[in-house]
Image (cartoon, grey):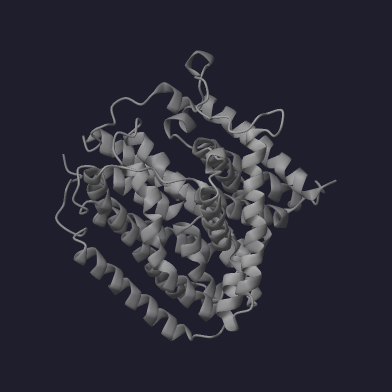
Amino acid sequence: MNSFMVAFGLASIALVIGTFLRAKVPFLRNMLVPASVIAGILGMIFMNAMVQFDISIGTDMNMFTTIVNELFTVSFISISLTSSKKTGDNTQKEMMKGIVGMGTVWNLLYALTPLLGYGIIRLCGGAFGMDSIYGTLIPFAFAQGPGQASAFGTVYESFGWENAAMIAVAFAAIGFVVAFGVGIPAAKLGISRGLAKHGGIMNESIIRGYLKKEEQADSMVRDTTCNSNIETLSYHFALIGLCYIVAIGISKIFALIPGFLGSSMSGLMFVNGMFAAYIVKFLMKKFNVDFLQDDVLQSKITSWTSDYLVVCAFMAVAFNVIGDWIIPMLVECAIMTVVTFAVCFYFGQRFGSDNDFERTLGLYGTSTGTVPSGISLVRIVDPEFKTNTAVELGLMNIVMMLSTPVYLVLLAMAAGSLSAGMTMLSLAGLCVVYLIILKVTKTWGKKSFSWKK
């Protein structure tokens, strides 16, 4: 049996069951739990049961970790191949508040959570034999999701930290749970208190999670190639494959850089995939063949990777590996959930626009799961996307590039090139820098809404 295809098949079965349960179980419908999260939890239980009873199924958790890593690279390539929407000058000016504000608060959390995580595991992890450095994996999981958690965890492992990828992916799986477990009640509370100006009554199709036959419409995807020659979908996947090979070349170039920087950048395939996609996109425009690529279809491919990323992230978690450390991990996750919620909802009220509530929810979902998690929460309070929040969540990735010093510092510590003390001092300094940016850009101002009736 092919281990990859078995893993893909099991994840697919879990997604089908998850979709059915979301439609039929009232609690799951009312909580708007995504089918991928339901599927992931079921898959995780199944995989660990197979291990517990020593039943061979033709694949294992390591394969799911590999799939997460590879799919994340594919998702970044697909995102980078998608063109950005153009907006008017006034809209752009207003959107900048959300883009800069949310992006900078995300950067703040990216630096703050490993600082706190290191301290938490230092206090409670020793009794369980857990090294403090594992606590610094939390930002890659909560703030970035399973793909980057696996990618950075793998880099940690290359520096000698065993099972770092598994620990990071476990953190990411818990992140999805708290993203929706806390975010959905907060969204409903906001609707009940009139904070969601575009909330109203949610569409029944959104609640059940699928479209009935009479609700379905023709696809908006355009055929850009003749099917007798090559299927349009095949062409788009071919572009992704091309970018992946270019990314491998970029990784080999980075590997020539001496020290931890070279080995780290060489191992971050999702970053190199993004660079490769930008190069390919540029060349396509240069040679006037970019019309062959459809952004709607490209976005659907990105969404496809997101669904499977979530499922496989859960199914990659092995209880027997994290079992000894589960208590300190849960303690860290609980504290980080409170911290992330507090930071997002404090600054979210102070960006200075009439869609700050939507931004707050989107920022929290993104800071505990992924951008799609944030958009899912925004959809609850703004089902027709009448605000620009969803677009801002995507564009804030530009501001999030300012987080680069954070992961460079963490990787330097993991490689033994920087002491723990200097690492923590650097992270604290970066937190101050991000706070200053919020003040200078005037995205840290007075409250624009209140939770009180």
Q: Along the horizontal axis of the image, is 87 left or right of 280?
A: left
Pick out the residue farthest to the right: 1
Q: Residue at x 24, y 46 (%)?
A: 89
- Work out whether 246 lies above or below 80: below
- Write down the quadrant of residue 231 in the picture: top right
Q: Extreme left residue here?
A: 446
Q: Is residue 170 in sight in this rendering?
A: no
Q: In this view of the protein, can residue 204 be seen by the observer? A: yes
Residue 375, percent from left and from top: 40, 42
Vertical side of 64 occupied by 399: above or below:
below
Provide residue 122's location: percent of width, then percent of height: 47, 77
Which quarter of the rendered picture does the C terminus lie within? top left
Q: Position of residue 371 (x, y in %)?
A: 44, 49
222, 173: nearer the viewer? 222
User: Residue 16, image x and y in percent?
Assistant: 63, 32
Q: Nearer the viewer, residue 79 or 230?
A: 230
Residue 191 left/right relative to 448: right
Q: Residue furthest top?
A: 214
Decide if residue 32 is on the left or right side of residue 50. left
Residue at 43% x, 44% y: name it. 180
- In the drawing, does residue 190 fall left or right of residue 48? left
Nearest the eye: 402 or 316: 402
- Choose between 346 and 83: the one closer to the eye: 83
